[in-house]
Image (cartoon, grey):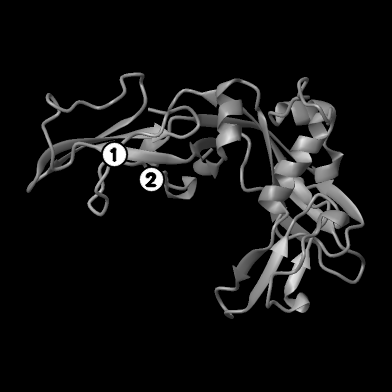
Amino acid sequence: MSEKPIIFNTEMVRAILDGRKSETRRPMKPQPDHLHVFTTSGKSEYHAMIYCGENKDDIEVKAPYAVGDILWVRETFVVESNFNLDSESAYPPPFSDGRPISRHDNPLYGAYWEQCHYRATDKAPELCYDDCDEPCCRWKPSIHMPRWAARLFLEVTNVRAQRVQEITEADIAREGFRFVFNDPMCYPAEYYFKQTWNSIYGQWKKRIDKETGAIWYECYPWSERDIPDYPKGVCPADCVAYPNPWVFANTFKQIEAPK
């Protein structure tokens, strides 16, 4: 068991808080070029063996998350603090709902606290910035959330390897998607899952090989028809798309913050 960060967008954070989301899928890396047989390794349930043919070496791919792992959720946030301002008695933290507070004792500026506002549930606060004349809010991307600011913790209970299109209606519901009854277009829940998948994984992402410095672009769209246009000014030979990719499907349950 280990503790690892995981990123969710605002809508998925709301789904977790509402108890609607208990699964998440992430593309398998690397993706096999020619997949003939897919079996589970004898090592553990979160290792997958990809057999690529008689003249190719097998590829063993380890899932990023294992059964028993604790995941702390990174979400869009902004930090409020009384740093270099009033004392805590005069300027207390804005929330007393159990969300984390980080306290510090600076030798120059004295004691101060930090506490987060979360975009998924909180209104945009009016905060002061050195380079802004009027109070405003500058939400920070989830990737920058520190561990102390996390309020959601998940325990991985199952890991499966499958194609993304193998997702079932029950899986889609556990991913947090529901049929929208007041939707005039009456799209099924699969449509919304597909759109969300393509918005996150179906777009070209720049990759750089740390050893060679080689640059390429890759994406993992739902299907071949969802492959986007090549990035402007980029050679098509430097772009690799993996339609209907192999994914690790992770099932989890929400837990209390580890002590």
Q: In the displayed image of the protein, which residue is found farthest to the front? A: 134
The quarter holding residue 237 reads bottom right
Residue 153 x %, y %: 50, 30
Label 1 to label 2, Cα distance in Å? 8 Å
- Quadrant in the picture for the N terminus: top right
Mark 2 residue type: Arg
Identity of the residue drawn at 25% across and 54% down: 131
Give the number of the disc on residue 106. none
Residue 48 x %, y %: 76, 49
Quick one: 52 or 226, which is closer to the camera?
226
Identity of the residue drawn at 37% across and 40% down: 78
- On the image, numbered disc 2 is attached to which residue? 138
Give the number of the disc on residue 127. 1
Q: Is residue 100 visible?
A: yes
Tell me the crowding category of disc 2: few under 14, some 14 to 19, or many 20 or more residues within 10 angstroms, Cα based.
Answer: some
Identity of the residue drawn at 11% across and 34% down: 86
- Left or right, residue 173 beside residue 82: right
Q: Is residue 248 visible?
A: no
Q: Is residue 12 above or below residue 144?
A: above
Q: Is residue 133 above or below residue 124?
A: below
Quick one: 179 or 185, which is closer to the camera?
185
- Quadrant in the picture for the C terminus: top left
- Left or right, residue 251 beside residue 246: left
Tag 1 and tag 2, C-beta contact below 8 Å: yes
Mark 1 residue type: Leu
- Left or right, residue 81 beside residue 55: left
Quick one: 186 or 85, which is closer to the camera?
186
The quarter holding residue 179 reads top right
